[in-house]
Amino acid sequence: MSGFWTIVRRDLKLAQRQGMDSYMVVAFFVIAVVLFPFGVGPEANILARISSGVIWVAALLAAMLSLERLFQIDFEDGSLELMALQPVPLEVVVMAKITAHWLTTGLPLLVATPLLAVFMNLPYEGFWVLVLTLAIGTPSLSLIGAIGAALILGSRRGGVLLSLLILPLYIPVLIFGVSAVDGAISGLSVKAHLLIMAGLLVAALPLCPWAGAGAIRQALET
Amino acid sequence: MIFHKYANPNRFLKLATTIQPWAAGATGLFFVTGLYFALLASPGDYQQGETVRIMYVHVPAAWMAMFCYTAMAMAAAVGLIWKHPVADLAARSTAPIGACFTFLALFTGSLWGKPMWGTWWVWDARLTSVLILFFLYLGYMALANAFDDPARGSKAAAILALVGAVNVPVIKFSVDWWNTLHQPASVVKIGGPAIHSSMLVPLILMALAFKAYYIWVLLIRIRGEINAGKIRALRLRQVHGGPPPIAARPSQGVN
């Protein structure tokens, strides 16, 4: 467990010292959403109708932006190999890096959401559900994305490849996140959607570090 | 165990050489009879008229799209667990074939949808999940070919195929529910379980033709992969100087 927290602290410290990374993700999130009123026009009811979907898609793309570097830098300078050699299982290392990734991207996205909800004229009934779905959903995004980030290690053209691998796998999270918010806006019960999202998270929690560690082992073998 | 026996590419090639003409023959036979029944000897639908004949390509293609993904994921698992080199190649060779079947299913479905539903595309649950399946195939192929060392590409892509296999049912259900939540059942899939034997016979013949075709093309592709591996090994040997002793050679076609 101490190994886990050591790596989380290390990654957070790195993110903090290199600065900017989290801000850039949030900036991307905000700008991507702000483009939509220009694209579809500023009518309040159209924006309200698409707000949940737009915010969710933008959050998903923003979370994906920084994934490429999740393992890449450590892989290139060899520290990933050292982490794989230490007594802490590689799965725990992967889990720690995922945790750090979520703390540096998922959490800032959550903080930026109220602003975007105002921009997109999101109905008030949907707001807390949106925050809640993002809170449950973004960890799943980090978890699933970590598999992709581990798979592309050592490949040519990593970034574009990553989006091709990961985006189809993100679809369930997106669907349930958006339907929960839409359900809340139209006054339906959202419990089922939230439970399914929580279920996805609980399933991804053990499976994704396992698959990610498998992929990293493949990458380190060669 | 017979399964391990064919981990040797050369032994597998011998088996493939035996099966291949039979697969080719079966493909030809089933296509000729299937197309005869499908296009000439079966009745048109009383509602859909002649357009129902698209079904004889569309439905087998959709079946094969799912079958190929299952086959690919199973081959990938075998390759990962037992480090079975031919299984790796089989998974790798299945992906483009499966992607083509998926594309064919989407394309013919679109052609069928225009006269029947009045639109090329709807965000129906089934269409959407097949489209996502197509993207999964594309992702697999992109990853498998993204590495300088093809064996490494196969390994990484195998993990992706398995992750996809876990995710495909989830995607399927989520898309099903998403559809029912958002739009009323304006699009009802035509068909139902009751299908008359005059249509079932050509359908099954065409499905068999597709399957035989898959086996035939798969064997050709695996052969191609094995030969490509041999060429790569020869090139490497050329670059690195004189031939190493036979015992020290890497197993051919694997790396």
Image (tube, coloured by chain):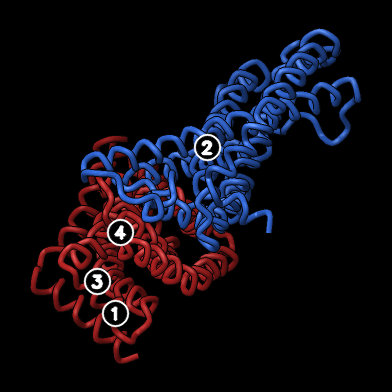
At x 77%, y 10%, the residue is: B39
Q: Is residue A146 visible?
A: yes
**Residue where numbered disc 2 is placed:** B222
For mark 3, give the secondary structure: helix
User: Which element is circle 4 on?
Assistant: helix
Who is closer to the viewer here, B80 or B235?
B235
Q: Which mark is residue A80?
A: 3
Question: Mark 4 and mark 3: span between their CA atoms?
Answer: 22 Å
Q: Are marks 2 and 1 on the same chain?
A: no
Chain name for mark 2: B
User: Could you tell me which residue is drawn at 36 percent across and 42 percent down?
Assistant: B145
- In the image, B227 versus B30, the foreground residue is B227
Q: Which chain has been coloured red in this picture?
A: A
Mark closer to the observer (2, 3)? 2
Q: Mark 4 belongs to which amino acid?
A: Ala
Task: Give the chain letter at badge 3.
Answer: A
Mark 1 and mark 3 in contact (Cβ < 8 Å)? no
* Picture disc at residue A11: none
Report how far apart the C-alphas of labels 3 and 1 lie in the structure. Answer: 9 Å
Q: Which residue is mark 1?
A: A85
Q: Is residue B95 left or right of residue B126?
A: left
Secondary structure type for disc 2? helix
Query: What residue do we see at 31% from left, 70% from top?
Result: A102
Can you say whether B54 is above or below A95 in the image? above
Chain to which the residue tagged by mark 4 belongs: A
Residue A186 visible: no
- Circle 2 crowding by C-alpha within 10 Å: few under 14, some 14–19, many from 20: many
The three-letter code of the residue at mark 2 reads: Ile
